[in-house]
Image (spheres, rainbow, N blue to C red):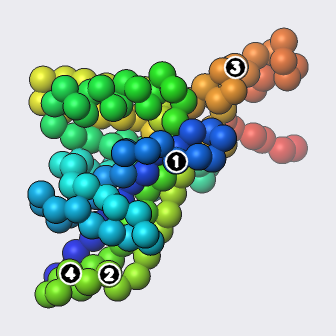
């Protein structure tokens, strides 16, 4: 069975306004695509969204690209400006490449850039994960919340 999936990404400010000129899709090489009245240009990136953990949180995801100056600049800017990243995964007809249906839409906080000689990545955190994503820029401490558990295990007697 053959499937085709295109990821459309948009960046937006925490105020809800979208960042102009930062709309990308990763399927139609060297083409612009219009979806929902918005134009998306091609960018070579992959979306890595984790399935979550046993606890049900989805605090691990990333946009991964080649380590180009453009990708590294956008990833650094997204992190420094505290942008949100909206990712829409769309199922395409594998023969005509027409859009069949929206698979999912997710919104992530741009957490931190990571760069190696082989790839550039923008780590994404759940907007609800205040510890990993540093939103708001605080961490849990006994001063803020009282005694903290030392393990993830709970026992009842």
Residue 58, percent from left and from top: 53, 49
The residue closer to the viewer here, 18 or 102, is 18
| Relative to 44, residue 130 above or below | above
Image side of residue 154 versus residue 70, left or right: right
Residue density around tag 2, few if under 14, some if 14–19, many if 20 or more, within 10 Å = some
Image side of residue 32 versus residue 123, left or right: left
- Residue 97's label in the rendered image is 4
Residue 13, percent from left and from top: 57, 39
Q: Is residue 54 visible?
A: no
Determine the secondary structure under disc 4.
Answer: loop
Determine the secondary structure under disc 1.
Answer: strand
Q: From the image, state whether disc 1 or disc 4 is nearer to you.
A: 1
For the residues marked 4 and 3, what is the alpha-carbon distance in whole angstroms? 45 Å
| Relative to 75, residue 103 above or below | below
Report the residue marked by disc 2: 99
Q: Is residue 154 visible?
A: yes
Image side of residue 116 versus residue 59, left or right: left
Which of pointers 2 and 1 lies earlier in the amino acid sequence?
1
Q: Are marks 4 and 3 in contact (CB under 8 Å)?
A: no
Give me the residue at 63% from left, 47% from top: 16
Q: From the image, state whether disc 3 or disc 2 is nearer to you.
A: 2
Image side of residue 65 versus residue 57, left or right: left
The residue closer to the viewer here, 96 or 139, is 96
For the residues marked 3 and 2, what is the alpha-carbon distance in whole angstroms? 41 Å
Which of pointers 4 and 3 lies earlier in the amino acid sequence?
4
Which of pointers 3 and 2 lies earlier in the amino acid sequence?
2
Which of pointers 1 and 4 lies earlier in the amino acid sequence?
1
Report the residue marked by disc 1: 18
Report the residue marked by disc 3: 138
For the residues marked 1 and 3, what is the alpha-carbon distance in whole angstroms? 26 Å
């Amino acid at each position: 069975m053959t499937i085709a999936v295109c990821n459309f990404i948009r960046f937006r400010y925490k105020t809800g306004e979208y960042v102009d000129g930062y709309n990308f899709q990763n399927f139609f090489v060297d083409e612009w695509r219009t979806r929902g009245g918005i134009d998306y240009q091609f960018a070579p990136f992959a979306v890595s969204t984790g399935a979550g953990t046993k606890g049900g949180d989805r605090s691990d995801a990333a946009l991964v690209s080649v380590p180009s100056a453009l990708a590294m600049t956008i990833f650094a800017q997204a992190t420094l400006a505290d942008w949100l990243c909206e990712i829409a995964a769309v199922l395409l007809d594998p023969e005509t490449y027409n859009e069949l249906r929206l698979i999912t839409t997710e919104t992530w906080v741009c957490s931190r850039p990571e760069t190696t000689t082989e790839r550039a990545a923008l780590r994404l955190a759940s907007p609800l994960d205040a510890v990993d994503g540093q939103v708001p820029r605080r961490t849990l401490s006994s001063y803020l919340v009282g005694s903290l558990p030392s393990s993830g295990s709970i026992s009842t007697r």
